Image (cartoon, rainbow, N blue to C red):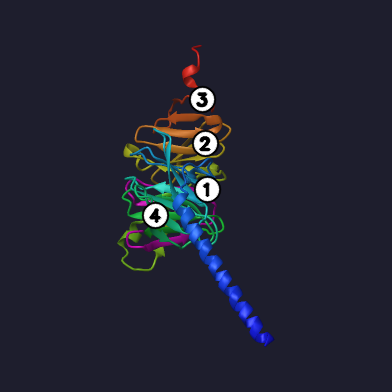
Amino acid sequence: MPADGSTIKSRIRNLLRSQSIKNKKKSKENLSRKVTLEKVLGVTASGNSGLACDPKSGLIAYPAGCVVVLLDPRNNRQNHIINTSRKAITALAFSPDGRFLVTGESGHMPAVRLWDVAERRHVAELQEHKYGVSCVAFSPNSKYIVSVGNQHDMMVNVWAWKMDVVVAANKVSSKVTAVSFSEDRSYFVTVGNRHVKFWYLDHCRASKVSAPVPLLGRVGLLGELRNNFFCDVACGRGSKCDSTFCITSSGLLCELNQSRTLDKWVDLQTSMARSISLSEDVLFCGCADGAVRVFSPDLRFVGTLPRPHALGVAISRCGRV
């Protein structure tokens, strides 16, 4: 009889527990319908790869934990993409036409995810990294996505995302901080700690096999600058399409020619440099204390952009000096 009593008690307990679980699920569903994310304060980007701008729309994307903030600077309005895996976003990049956004994650077995920007919905994902993604980039024709793992992962993958297949892969031995595609899509360049490397895609595009082929890589010939930390890179455009420009954290702007050899370099006259961006006519270098140095493609100094005003300053109320 005692055994029967304990069985009845356990059944009642399980029944009550299951009912409470159902009630919790219902309350969560009701809460998700009522609560929406309106605004995010702060940013968790740890480097250049955590900030992207769509040149067509001017939309700015940056991570805040597991959320991608899409900021329209013209009206200071935010939209959000929430990563369903709840893993922190570490890298992101827009496609050249601005339709898609690719993101990389942190943590164990991170995914490289593709998102539709207008609809803010998940389109595709690649799960070939093991320990975190440090950089992502689209090819100029949006056919390929390159993802570079962090220093613990050490993998470079070239993903043909429309076919959902990795066409080429290889290991990288250094910490990588940035990646840039050439204008003709034949190669891309990675930079990092004592690292500038050119990766070639010609044999990948010719290959019809389903398994990834080894990605062909060639190091840049850096001469006396080989021991620097290279923090950003941009492949040339227009008349300078055969050149590759990169900057060091110590404040050097370098140009490598089509033979991957250091051709020339200039001192940015700053204590630290962080980023580089270019067009066919001009190069912009982000430096310490908010300074932006401007150079022509042949590395002639053009000028320094005016620094932004301090936060909280009302420009309209400032008197003339």
Q: Quadrant of the N terminus?
A: bottom right
Position of residue 26 relative to residue 10, above or below, is above
Which residue is depicted at the point 46% across and 61% down? Answer: 170
What span is in magenta? Answer: 161-187
Q: How many marks?
A: 4
- Would you name the residue on which mark 2 appears? 252
Q: CA distance from mark 3 to mark 2?
A: 26 Å
Q: Nearer the viewer, mark 3 or mark 2?
A: 3
- Would you name the residue on which mark 3 appears? 309
Q: Which mark is residue 114?
A: 4
Q: Position of residue 164 (x, y in %)?
A: 36, 63
Of labels 4 and 2, earlier in sequence is: 4
Which residue is depicted at the point 47% across and 54% down? Answer: 32
Residue closest to the eye, 40 or 285: 40
- Per the image, is 178 magenta? yes
- Would you name the residue on which mark 1 appears? 192
Q: Nearer the viewer, mark 3 or mark 1?
A: 3
Tell me if residue 6 can be seen. Answer: yes
Of labels 1 and 2, earlier in sequence is: 1
Position of residue 131 relative to residue 74, above or below, is below
Q: Position of residue 58 (x, y in %)?
A: 37, 37
Q: Position of residue 295 (x, y in %)?
A: 43, 30
**Secondary-structure class at tag 2:** strand
**Secondary-structure class at tag 1:** strand
The local crowd at label 2, few if under 14, some if 14 to 19, many if 20 or more residues have their Cα within 10 Å, is many
Please name the amino acid that badge 2 sits on.
Leu
Q: CA distance from mark 4 to mark 2?
A: 34 Å
* Residue at the outermost top position: 321
Residue closest to the eye, 86 or 47: 86
Q: Nearer the viewer, mark 1 or mark 2?
A: 1
Asked if the residue under mark 4 is in contact with the one under mark 1, i.e. CB atoms within 8 Å, the reply is no
